[in-house]
Amino acid sequence: MSDAPAQEQDANAPHFSIEKIYLKDLSVENPNAPQAYLWRESPTVEIGLEQDQGTIEDGFHTVTVKVTVTATIADKTMFLVEAAMGGIFQIRNIPEPELQPLLAVHCANIIFPYVREVVSDAVQRMGYPAIYLQPINFEAIYQARVQQQLEQAAATKQ
């Protein structure tokens, strides 16, 4: 048997790890309670999605996914829930062209189930039936944003 130390990892090898998933912000409004619990109409539910990325320090990136759910009946707000979940990711030795899609798609896909759970739980704790957010195709959103940027750049050149 050899007592040789384990081979060291290549310092230039690509590295990705989840360092922390955390609740960054949670806002719950139930402005028309208790009257809203007697409303019999079905509410109109609007869902908003925002995403943000940043660099904390060399090799550490943050991604935030924010979901806003607003339920209204006849121009009256039944409830509003706004939740933002953040993630800290250690990403090293990934070429710059691959970094943005990694953050915007892969990292957002990791965070989304957590924010979906927070929203559903908050709505239930207000006494309303749970809201189940459908999966989000972050890749399609990213591709649409890239396409829009390309079109804007082409329009600027003309």
Image (cartoon, grey):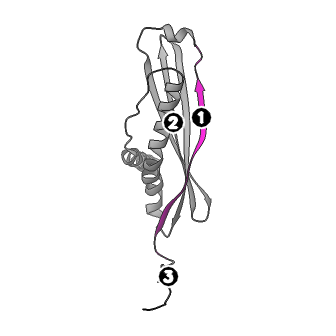
Identify whether 34 is placed above or below 91: above
User: Where in the figure is residue 117, as x and y percent of width and height?
Assistant: 47, 37
Return the disc, 1 or 2, that comes first in the chain's sequence.
Answer: 1
How far is mark 3 from mark 1, CA to CA? 43 Å
Judge whether residue 158 can be spotted in this image.
no
What residue is shown at x 49% (from left), y 39% (from top)? Answer: 115
Whether tag 1 and tag 2 are in contact, CB under 8 A, the answer is: yes
Judge whether residue 134 can be spotted in this image.
yes
Q: Residues within 10 Å of mark 1 (few under 14, many from 20)?
A: some
> What segment carries the magenta color?
12-33
Q: Amino acid at mark 2?
A: Val
What residue is shown at x 41% (from left), y 33% (from top)? Answer: 133
Farthest residue in the front direction?
1
Q: Residues within 10 Å of mark 3 (few under 14, many from 20)?
A: few
User: Where in the figure is residue 27, as x and y percent of width and height?
Assistant: 60, 30
Residue linked to disc 1: 26
Residue linked to disc 2: 118
User: Where in the figure is residue 1, as x and y percent of width and height?
Assistant: 42, 92
